Image (spheres, rainbow, N blue to C red):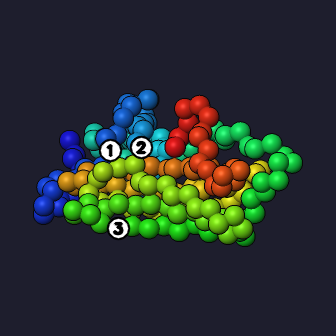
């Protein structure tokens, strides 16, 4: 048996997510892993590696073959109707990430500003973990919606988590507003 982990002087052992669905299929060892460690937000992958019998002992034959899982599709929200005069242009929108600290805990927020209307939308991080960070924010227009995509990383007492987030913003009559996602997809 092999146990893998690293050691943090304050938090103790830190282990990545466990391997699942471990099995032997003929002469091949197969398993699944979320790959959610080392600050990655991954849909995971399936792995396999062949075995061979060499001088009466089992040995690995060849390298590990990794097949990535497809990332779940984002359920896009309904866009505002055309012709309502509320056009959102990428060049008119500013997106800024802010990180602060209060009482030893991080606080993260994304500020979205629309210059022509003077409106601003603030999305506050949803975690109360002591360490929080947001990776680079991807910004693009999808129809009449602004799509923001980023990785949200949190850590508390040596336990680290990372998840992919998608936020959609539209220009309403009162200014910028967050649009809820449809269905139960990734955030």
- Report the front residue among 115 and 100: 115
Query: Measuring 52% from the left and 63% from the top, which residue is drawn there?
Result: 111
Q: Position of residue 130 (x, y in %)?
A: 26, 57
- Report the front residue among 165 and 96: 96
Task: Point out the frontmost of discs 2 and 3.
Answer: 3
Q: CA distance from mark 1 to mark 2?
A: 7 Å
Q: Which mark is residue 17?
A: 1
- Report the front residue among 33 and 74: 74
Q: Evaluate if marks 1 and 2 touch, with contact meaning CB atoms under 8 Å apart.
A: yes
Question: In the rendered image, which residue does mark 3 sit on?
Answer: 100
Of helix, strand and loop, which one carries label 2? loop
Q: Does 114 sit left or right of 49 as displayed?
A: right
- Image quadrant in which you'd find residue 40: bottom left
Q: CA distance from mark 1 to mark 3?
A: 29 Å
Query: Measuring 75% from the left and 63% from the top, which residue is drawn there?
Result: 89
Q: Which mark is residue 34?
A: 2
Question: Which of pointers 2 and 3 lies earlier in the amino acid sequence?
Answer: 2
Q: Position of residue 161 (x, y in %)?
A: 35, 50
- Residue farthest to the right, as pictured: 83
């Amino acid at each position: 048996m092999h146990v893998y982990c690293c050691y943090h002087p304050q938090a103790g052992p830190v282990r990545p997510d466990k391997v699942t669905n471990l099995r032997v299929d003929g002469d091949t060892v197969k398993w699944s892993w979320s790959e959610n460690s080392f600050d990655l937000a991954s849909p995971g992958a399936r792995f396999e590696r062949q075995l061979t019998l060499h001088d009466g002992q089992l040995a690995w034959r060849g390298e590990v073959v990794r097949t990535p899982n497809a990332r779940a599709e984002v359920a896009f929200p309904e866009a505002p109707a055309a012709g309502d005069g509320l056009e959102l242009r990428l060049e008119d929108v500013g997106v800024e990430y802010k990180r602060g600290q209060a009482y030893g805990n991080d606080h993260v927020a994304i500020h979205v500003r629309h210059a022509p209307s003077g409106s601003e939308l603030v999305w506050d991080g949803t975690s109360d973990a002591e360490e929080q960070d947001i990776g680079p924010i991807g910004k693009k227009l999808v129809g009449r919606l602004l799509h923001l995509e980023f990785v949200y990383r949190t850590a508390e007492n040596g336990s680290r988590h990372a998840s992919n987030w998608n936020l959609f913003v539209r220009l309403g009559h009162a200014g910028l507003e967050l649009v809820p996602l449809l269905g139960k997809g990734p955030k």
